[in-house]
């Protein structure tokens, strides 16, 4: 006989989607956001925390809402990687912050660049790292300094608003927008419109997780649209009209997924409304119950492109979008902008490679000075931790290149300098298990010494933990930091190795070879070995990623 309780089936818990009525706090992060919008922390930083100091900061602000303004506590020095997953956040926290400056579209004028350089030297012990999302990250920031830093940034049109947190992060754009002779079209106006309409808007300041955007008409597909939450990719339709192909649901981390094409054609004037529709779906239907399943990619994977398009058109845009063409294949085998190339106006742009994105305040001042001396007022950051100086007259190019090269800012770098990236690593990051920047920099030096004639495209991405900030799954050689045992059975820093990942013509996450690991110390030996095997065995025009798929396992070890 059934009891009354069993007759009333419990409503399924679902995934915490607001649109389906699940609004109760589902985890600590959701509870914090429900209690107070992250955007509200700004005034507390100005009025209270900057005046009363680090110890006055509410823990829910310190490890939560302050991210809405680009602030993370950095890792206390001296804590080894084995403790990363064991210690509580307050045991890992230092009393200093990482501060991320948004550089939407990678666009900077010299006044802005000098402002960042000045802040780096005055408040950040000189630190200034280029990220693979076109931002600049500063370290050693004290809470007392933050209001002055904001004043200085905002006076030149820069911001840290929603640079971190469960928010719409920096919008990626091609650094050559408006000047590349081969670009489909210039997406800068759409980036500006999305930024001005929606960044800092409480309507989109409480998302299930972070939300990453790319908008570009770049023929090299430099903004890696395949791994963003939403991407607008420049296309020309059969009527000769320019617009965007819309992609949704890309992302890496511990559960990587490639974005899906919705198959629609978005006119440039529709782009910001369509963006608001996509992020609105994420806000309302995104999964909030479990944080590790809260990125948009999980919803897109469960729904499929067809349902996502239908909900976007019927519930959010209230109009159908026409079908549209897929993008052309990317130009060239390197999706960066390093080197000297003509602009459409007759001037030249010069792209150069700092070491794994590591710069400092003095070097940023030097870059601004070099650019200014050679007639340029504009510099750009790229999604490969590189920079570009625009608008250089033909008779200024050789002198500019010589000055950059003399400052160890390589315009003609080796493959290893050009295509090695590294995340922040254990030096400052509380999630990291191993050191990355110095390891990657030393690796470049060793490979240049050992393989001086190797010049094929080859991406080497070095990550300090499994979260893939440095995009390990899409690299030719992706290195995921972990502790490993050396030949004496001692636990040391090392890497799990991913091979043959790629984006573009054959996007994919590469080949996993069971148990393929190396210690940090033996890393140069490993990379030299596998690159030499590729160089010896490759067929005409065969990429490293293609070779990996057919190579004997012994040659990959």
Image: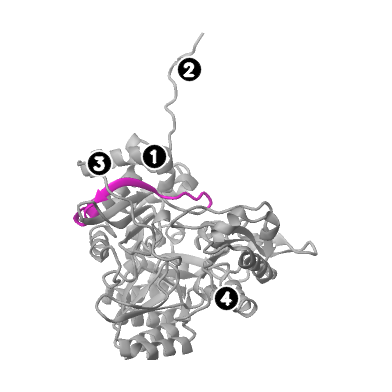
| Residue 110, percent from left and from top | 31, 82
User: Which residue is labeled 4 in the image?
Assistant: 441
Helix, strand or loop at label 4? It is helix
Q: For marks 2 and 1, give the one nearer the viewer.
A: 1
Q: Earlier in the sequence, mark 1 or mark 3?
A: 1
User: Which residue is labeled 1 in the image?
Assistant: 304
Q: Earlier in the sequence, mark 4 or mark 2?
A: 2
Q: Earlier in the sequence, mark 2 or mark 1?
A: 2
Rendered image coloring scheme: one colour
Helix, strand or loop at label 3? It is helix
Q: Quadrant of residue 82?
A: bottom right
Q: Earlier in the sequence, mark 1 or mark 4?
A: 1
Q: Which labelled disc corresponds to residue 6? A: 2
Q: Earlier in the sequence, mark 3 or mark 2?
A: 2
Q: Which labelled disc corresponds to residue 313? A: 3
Location of the C terminus (image quadrant): bottom right
**From which residue to which does the magenta span run?**
254-273
Residue for point 50% across, 50% down: 256
> Label 4: how many residues lie within 10 Å, few (<14), some (14-19) or many (20+)?
some
> Left of 365 or right of it: where is 87?
right
Give the CA separation, mark 1 to mark 4: 41 Å
Q: For marks 4 and 2, give the one nearer the viewer.
A: 4
């Amino acid at each position: 006989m059934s009891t009354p309780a069993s007759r009333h089936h419990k409503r399924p818990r679902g995934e915490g989607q607001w649109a389906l009525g699940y609004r109760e706090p589902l985890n600590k992060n959701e509870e914090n956001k429900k209690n107070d919008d992250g955007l509200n922390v700004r005034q507390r930083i100005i009025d209270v925390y900057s005046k009363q100091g680090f110890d006055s900061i509410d823990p829910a602000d310190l490890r939560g809402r302050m991210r809405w303004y680009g602030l993370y506590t950095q890792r206390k020095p001296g804590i080894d990687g084995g403790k990363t997953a064991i210690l509580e956040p307050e045991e890992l926290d230092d009393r200093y912050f990482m501060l991320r400056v948004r550089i939407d579209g990678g666009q900077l004028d010299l006044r802005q660049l000098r402002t960042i350089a000045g802040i780096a030297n005055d408040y950040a012990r000189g630190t200034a790292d280029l990220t693979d999302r076109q931002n600049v990250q500063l370290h050693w920031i004290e809470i007392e300094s933050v209001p002055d830093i904001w004043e200085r940034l905002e006076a030149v049109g820069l911001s840290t608003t929603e640079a971190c947190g469960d928010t719409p992060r920096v919008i990626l754009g091609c650094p050559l927008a408006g000047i590349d002779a081969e670009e489909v079209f210039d997406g800068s106006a759409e980036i500006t419109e999305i930024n001005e309409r929606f960044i800092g808007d409480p309507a989109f300041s409480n998302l299930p997780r972070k939300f990453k955007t790319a908008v570009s008409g770049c023929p090299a597909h430099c903004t890696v649209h395949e791994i963003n939450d939403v991407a607008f990719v420049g296309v020309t339709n059969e009527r000769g009209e320019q617009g965007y192909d819309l992609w949704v649901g890309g992302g890496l981390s511990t559960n990587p997924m490639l974005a899906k094409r919705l198959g629609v054609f978005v006119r440039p004037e529709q782009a910001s409304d369509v963006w608001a529709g996509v992020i609105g779906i994420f806000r309302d239907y995104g999964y909030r119950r479990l944080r590790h399943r809260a990125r948009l990619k999980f919803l897109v994977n469960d729904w499929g492109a067809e349902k996502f398009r239908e909900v976007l058109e019927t519930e959010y845009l209230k109009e159908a979008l026409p079908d549209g063409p897929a993008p052309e294949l990317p130009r060239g085998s390197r999706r960066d902008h390093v080197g000297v190339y003509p602009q459409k106006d007759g001037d030249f742009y010069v792209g150069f490679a700092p070491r794994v994105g590591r710069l400092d305040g003095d070097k940023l001042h030097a870059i601004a000075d070099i650019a200014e001396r050679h007639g340029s007022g504009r510099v750009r950051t790229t999604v490969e931790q590189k920079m570009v100086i625009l608008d250089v007259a033909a008779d200024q190019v050789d002198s500019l290149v010589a000055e950059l090269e003399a400052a160890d800012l390589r315009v003609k770098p080796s493959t290893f300098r050009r295509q090695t990236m590294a995340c922040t690593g254990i030096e400052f990051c509380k999630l990291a298990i191993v050191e990355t920047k110095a390891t990657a920099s030393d690796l470049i030096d060793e490979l240049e010494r050992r393989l001086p004639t190797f010049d094929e495209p080859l991406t080497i991405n070095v990550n300090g933990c499994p979260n893939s900030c440095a995009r390990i799954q899409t690299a030719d050689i992706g290195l995921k930091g972990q502790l490993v045992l050396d030949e004496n059975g001692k636990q040391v820093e090392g890497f799990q190795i991913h091979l043959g990942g790629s984006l573009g013509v054959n996007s994919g996450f590469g080949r996993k070879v069971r148990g393929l690991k190396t210690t940090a110390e033996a890393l140069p030996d490993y990379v030299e070995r596998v690159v030499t095997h590729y160089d010896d065995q490759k067929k005409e025009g065969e990429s490293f990623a293609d070779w990996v798929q057919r190579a004997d396992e012994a040659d990959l070890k």
